[in-house]
Image (cartoon, helix red, strand yellow):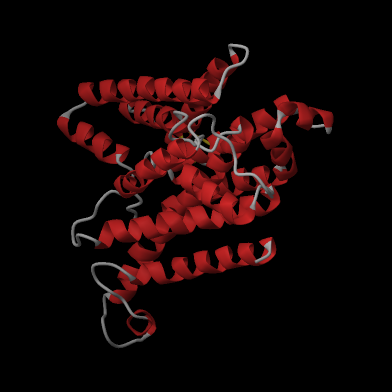
């Protein structure tokens, strides 16, 4: 199958999943019950006010996390790089948690203070990880991963401190938020997140050719006229913009940014002009599927979607690690 056909297949399947998912739940809905004037009187409200916004939020969050992971993997040339393993999600979570704990009520041009704080936290964490990885000549993939783990633990400890000094209700809310979730009523959160994901994704699609060269080597990229430092800053800004907004809305959700790009790379090769749209669609559909499982498997009780992604992502991480223990690299070809 050609790349174009594979891309179209991924996009079509993602669209199908997004359409069908709102009908699935502890209370199954049919098209007739949603649109027909008779029948179940509460079905349209459940569908349009709860199910559709939730699926839309999950799809947007999955898109942003997946394409952010793709960009980090290209820049660091490491298939294990993603917002969760690099500590970026923890940094964003700390920024949002600190803002909420401070009791401030700020905003800028319609952007909430929590989103701005999470964005700054994400930028700080990726800057620390990148600085540590580059501080020594000949630093390896393991150096970067260990730096990410250390940064993640540091910010996680600060979040625990905030949780400890909070009252019981606030502490429980922080704990539940840290598990990740896309529970939402209405489209306000979805519309607030949409500009961040659209802007960040558009930026990364614009630099897709440069990501191809960066994924090979910095020297090759520089020899082809790429301003390596500038492209890195653009990628870090775009990814942090999306991660900050997603974490402030949904909490930290791990491993989507690792699994979606890697699977798409196996299917499509290494051409980022195809990988960016495919990863967006695959990541969105994947998180929608995970959330569908989370709200149906033990209905009416709902499992936080971050728990489901971690249960899948942990073994996937180990599989990637064991696949090439001597030195992680992208699959050849494409």
The residue positioned 27% from the left and 34% from the top of the image is 174
Q: 221 or 63: which is nearer to us? A: 221
Task: Give the left or right position of residue 206, taking residue 194 as reference.
Answer: right
Q: Count how many numbered circles sit on residues in the image.
A: 0
35 in relation to 228, above or below: below
Task: Give the left or right position of residue 268, taking residue 326 as reference.
Answer: right
Give the image location of residue 121, x and y in percent: 47, 26
Give the image location of residue 40, x and y in percent: 26, 81
Q: 105 or 266: which is nearer to us? A: 266
Give the image location of residue 192, x and y in percent: 48, 48
157 in relation to 295, above or below: above
Quadrant (top left/top right/bottom left/bottom right) for the N terminus: bottom right
The residue positioned 46% from the left and 40% from the top of the image is 320
119 in relation to 20, above or below: above
Q: Quadrant of residue 296?
A: bottom left
The residue positioned 36% from the left and 51% from the top of the image is 182
Q: Which residue ends up furthest to the bottom in the rendered image?
A: 38
């Amino acid at each position: 199958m050609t790349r174009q056909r594979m891309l179209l297949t991924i996009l079509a399947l993602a669209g199908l999943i997004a359409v069908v998912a709102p009908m699935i739940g502890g209370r199954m809905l049919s098209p007739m019950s949603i649109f027909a004037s008779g029948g179940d009187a509460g079905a349209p409200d459940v569908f349009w006010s709860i199910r559709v916004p939730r699926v839309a939020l999950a799809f947007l969050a999955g898109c942003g996390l997946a394409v952010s992971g793709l960009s980090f993997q290209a820049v660091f040339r490491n298939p294990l790089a993603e917002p969760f393993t690099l500590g970026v999600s923890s940094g964003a979570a700390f920024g949002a948690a600190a803002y909420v704990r401070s009791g401030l009520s700020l905003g800028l041009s319609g952007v909430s203070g929590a989103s701005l704080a999470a964005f700054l936290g994400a930028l700080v964490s990726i800057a620390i990880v990148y600085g540590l990885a580059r501080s020594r000549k000949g630093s390896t993939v393991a150096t970067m991963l260990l730096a990410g783990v250390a940064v993640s633990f540091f910010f996680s400890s600060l979040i625990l401190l905030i949780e400890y000094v909070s009252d019981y209700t606030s502490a429980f809310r922080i704990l539940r938020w840290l598990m990740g979730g896309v529970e939402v009523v209405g489209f306000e959160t979805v519309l607030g997140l949409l500009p961040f994901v659209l802007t960040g994704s558009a930026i990364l699609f614009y630099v897709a050719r440069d990501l191809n060269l960066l994924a090979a080597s910095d020297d090759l990229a520089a020899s082809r006229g790429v301003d390596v430092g500038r492209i890195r800053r653009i990628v870090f800004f775009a990814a942090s913009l999306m991660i900050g907004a997603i974490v402030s809305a949904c909490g930290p959700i791990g491993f989507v940014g690792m699994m979606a790009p890697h699977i798409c790379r196996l299917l499509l090769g290494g051409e980022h002009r195809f990988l960016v749209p495919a990863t967006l669609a695959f990541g969105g559909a994947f998180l929608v599927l995970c959330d569908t499982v989370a709200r149906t498997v033990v209905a009416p009780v709902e499992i936080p979607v971050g728990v489901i992604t971690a249960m899948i992502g942990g073994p996937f991480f180990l599989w990637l690690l064991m696949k090439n223990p001597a030195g992680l690299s992208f699959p050849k070809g494409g």
